[in-house]
Image (tube, rainbow, N blue to C red):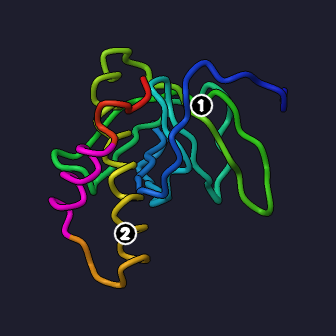
Amino acid sequence: MNTQFSREYIRHPSKVPLVIIPHSTREQLSLKLNNISTGGLSFDSPVEFHTNAIVKIKIPSIKPVFKVNAVVQWCRQIKGCFEMGVQFLDQDDAYKVRMVEQVCHISEYRKEKQQVTGRRMSWNNASMEWIEKNGGSFPH
């Protein structure tokens, strides 16, 4: 495996819950998203996936549920688990991914604001504040 690789897309960090369903089994894994970009995403898994394996990805916290098919581009063992990166199979998913990226940023913004103020912030308020502050400069 090549541990040196260049990124074609800007990665946006997040810890949004996601579900990975390998096409070869009915089993599904509930994991956390590491980061996401227009081209794909990365996550940690207790299970190793082979390069070129096809997986279905769902992010159930986003309504309607975000669902895409992806192919594993790389997988490396780190601290007792496997970190992997997948590339979306359908390039038309780019618009959906852009929306997911914004949701990830809003989620992080909401958590940060709650930590600073000590009060829970509604999703709608966090969304409006984040869009007002960052919507125009959100990276492409």
Main secondary structure type of the part rendered in magenta: helix
State the residue position of label 2.
113
- Identify the residue shown where x is 23% and y is 44%: 132
Viewer-side label of 1, 2: 2
Instruction: Name the spot of residue 72 as percent of width and height, x first.
Output: 59, 31
| Magenta part of the chain | 122-133
What distance separates the C-alpha of mark 1 from that of mark 2?
Answer: 35 Å
Which is more toward the observer, 24 or 99?
99
Q: Quadrant of the C terminus?
A: top left
Outermost bottom residue:
118
Note whether 31 is above or below 73 in the view shown. Answer: below
Which is more toward the observer, 104 or 81?
104
Note whether 56 is above or below 112 in the view shown. Answer: above
Going by the numbered disc 2, the residue's amino acid type is Lys
Q: Earlier in the sequence, mark 1 or mark 2?
A: 1
Q: Please, what secondary structure does the residue beneath circle 1 have?
A: strand
Instruction: Name the spot of residue 137 as percent of width and height, x first.
Output: 37, 31
Would you call the spot at circle 1 few (<14 residues within 10 Å), some (14-19), or many (20 or more)?
Answer: many
Going by the numbered disc 1, the residue's amino acid type is Val
Is 79 included in the stretch rendered in magenta?
Answer: no
- Identify the residue shown where x is 68% and y is 35%: 50
Instruction: Name the spot of residue 117 as percent of width and height, x first.
Output: 36, 79
- Identify the residue shown where x is 29% and y is 50%: 130
Residue 78: quarter of image: bottom right
Q: Please, what secondary structure does the residue beneath circle 2 have?
A: helix
Would you call the spot at circle 2 few (<14 residues within 10 Å), some (14-19), or many (20 or more)?
Answer: some
Instruction: Name the spot of residue 48 as percent of width and height, x first.
Output: 68, 48
Outermost front residue:
133
Note whether 130 is above or below 69 in the view shown. Answer: below
State the residue position of label 1.
72
- Identify the residue shown where x is 57% and y is 41%: 42
Note whether 122 is above or below 88 in the view shown. Answer: below
